[in-house]
């Protein structure tokens, strides 16, 4: 989950060096993130379908290989166009990340542990942000920003070898045992048969239409992705230009947000086990992320480092935790044989939001020569997330069930004790 976005996080952490070296505007720099995530969004639907039929180890190696190729392009880049080509490759690698890792969780993790592992694997993205924020600026002062990309390429190749050697080729015993007591679902897809039969209790076969809640998750991912990535991409530059932080301290804002994001995703991954509707949590997270963006707005107006760090804290604790709740809810509501396809649909919304956020805020930054208009838009988008969550929660049929029972694949659901 972390190797795909490492490139864009690294460029963001060293944004002032990249902008000065290539003599580009902040708006053009935002275009890099927009192109990256647009490529990811375009690729996600196709890769989501493929992930239902491709082995997990093969998918993970494609992710690492694509990320390594992107970083090598940056390392040898001669102009802005090279960076555009690199971020297209990086976006394609990211597109496979959520469908591939969701499939691996479904195939290798017992049902009652899946929600917690979703939080763990989603935290990999923020682990990448932490690594980029804390290491890239410091190393770039010695090797240059292209040198850091070369070192990252080597790291990705090492991880490719580790992944190839460590990922099992078949589902774990606990998962297989639970499937033997239920109707077949995912094994028919992975085994290459035409379609899986209807699963008891779902009312929907592998070829059935995706539930309406999947599209609600996709819409929420689109809106939240706008705010999340606009903040991630421009946070270091904002801290330097508006609050007066030096390069390394500016990168540290991204690192702090990333490490808080790692913890928050794991914590929220456990928390959703105790809640009924994921949209209750998404309402809380949307409002909390809006408050974080408001603190960043206030920090820019007052040039207050304290307000900036408070905004960073809320961004990491609320905004960066959104995706784990979205993905956990998706795995609950998606038909068992279409987890990859549903993940792809949500990923399309997420990556389109990721593309639009930096592009819009970069354009506003150039037009108004400051970040204030951009932060106002981010606040509005997060408030729209809260409204969408409230409406969807109100319209969801039936009474909420415990996450500890609903997060698992319907086909894997154990029989309740008498």
Image (cartoon, rainbow, N blue to C red):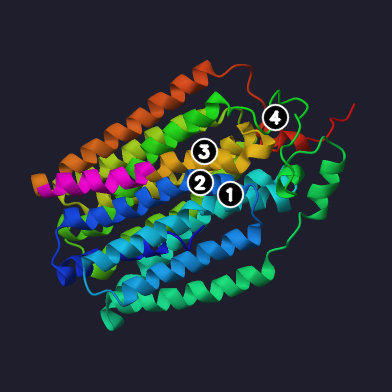
Using the numbered discs, state the Cα–Cα distance from disc 3 to disc 2 in whole angstroms: 20 Å
Query: Would residue 338 be counted in the magenta stretch?
Result: no
Above or below for 404 versus 60: above
Q: Main secondary structure of the magenta part?
A: helix
408 lies left or right of 277: right
Q: Quadrant of the C terminus?
A: top right
Identify the mark nearer the N-term, 1 or 3: 1
Q: In the rendering, at what x and y percent does residue 125 appear? A: 47, 56
Mark 3 or 2: in front is 2
Instruction: For mark 3, give the secondary structure.
Output: helix
Foreground residue among 381 and 81? 81
Identify the mark nearer the N-term, 4 or 2: 2
Using the numbered discs, state the Cα–Cα distance from disc 4 to disc 1 in whole angstroms: 18 Å
For label 2, the residue is 46
Measuring 75% from the left and 48% from the top, which residue is drawn there? 110
For label 3, the residue is 326
Q: In the rendering, at what x and y percent does residue 299 appear? A: 21, 48
Identify the mark nearer the N-term, 3 or 2: 2
Mark 4 or 3: in front is 4
- Residue 366 in view of the camera: yes
Foreground residue among 294 and 371? 371
Mark 2 touches mark 1? (CB < 8 Å): yes
Q: Which residues are magenta?
A: 352-366
For label 1, the residue is 50
- Give the label on residue 205, or none: 4
Mark 3 touches mark 2? (CB < 8 Å): no
Using the numbered discs, state the Cα–Cα distance from disc 4 to disc 2 in whole angstroms: 20 Å
């Amino acid at each position: 989950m972390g190797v795909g976005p490492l490139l864009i996080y690294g460029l963001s952490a060293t944004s002032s060096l990249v902008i000065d070296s290539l003599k580009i505007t902040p708006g053009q720099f935002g275009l890099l993130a927009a192109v990256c995530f647009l490529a990811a969004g375009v690729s996600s639907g196709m890769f989501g379908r493929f992930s239902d039929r491709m082995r997990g180890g093969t998918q993970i190696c494609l992710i690492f290989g694509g990320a390594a190729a992107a970083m090598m392009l940056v390392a040898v880049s001669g102009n802005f166009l090279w960076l555009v080509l690199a971020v297209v490759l990086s976006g394609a690698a990211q597109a496979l990340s959520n469908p591939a890792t969701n499939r691996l969780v479904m195939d290798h993790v017992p049902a009652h542990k899946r929600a917690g592992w979703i939080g763990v694997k989603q935290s990999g993205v923020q682990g990448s942000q932490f690594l980029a924020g804390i290491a890239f600026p410091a190393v770039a002062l010695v090797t240059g920003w292209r040198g850091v990309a070369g070192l990252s390429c080597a790291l990705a190749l090492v991880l490719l070898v580790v992944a190839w050697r460590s990922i099992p080729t078949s589902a774990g015993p606990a998962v297989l045992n639970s499937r033997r007591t239920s109707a077949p679902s995912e094994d028919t897809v992975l085994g290459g048969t035409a379609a899986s039969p209807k699963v008891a209790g779902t009312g929907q076969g592998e070829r059935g239409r995706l539930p309406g809640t999947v599209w609600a998750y996709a819409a929420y991912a689109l809106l939240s992705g706008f705010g999340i990535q606009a903040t991630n991409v421009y946070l270091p530059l904002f801290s330097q230009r508006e609050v007066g932080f030096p390069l390394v301290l500016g990168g540290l804002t991204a690192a702090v947000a990333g490490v808080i994001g790692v913890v928050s995703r794991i914590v929220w991954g456990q928390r959703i086990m105790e809640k009924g509707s994921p949209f209750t949590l998404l309402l809380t997270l949307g409002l909390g992320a809006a408050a974080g963006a408001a603190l960043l707005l206030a920090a820019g107006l007052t040039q207050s480092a304290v307000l900036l760090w408070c905004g960073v804290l809320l961004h990491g604790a609320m905004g960066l935790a959104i995706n784990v709740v979205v993905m956990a809810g998706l795995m609950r509501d998606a038909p068992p044989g279409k987890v990859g396809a549903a993940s792809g649909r949500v990923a399309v919304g997420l990556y389109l939001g990721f593309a639009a956020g930096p592009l819009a805020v970069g354009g506003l930054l150039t037009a108004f020569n400051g970040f204030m208009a951009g932060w106002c838009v981010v606040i509005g988008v997060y408030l729209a997330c809260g409204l969408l969550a409230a409406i969807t929660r109100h319209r969801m049929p039936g009474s909420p069930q415990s996450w500890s029972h609903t997060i698992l694949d319907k086909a894997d659901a154990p029989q309740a004790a008498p």
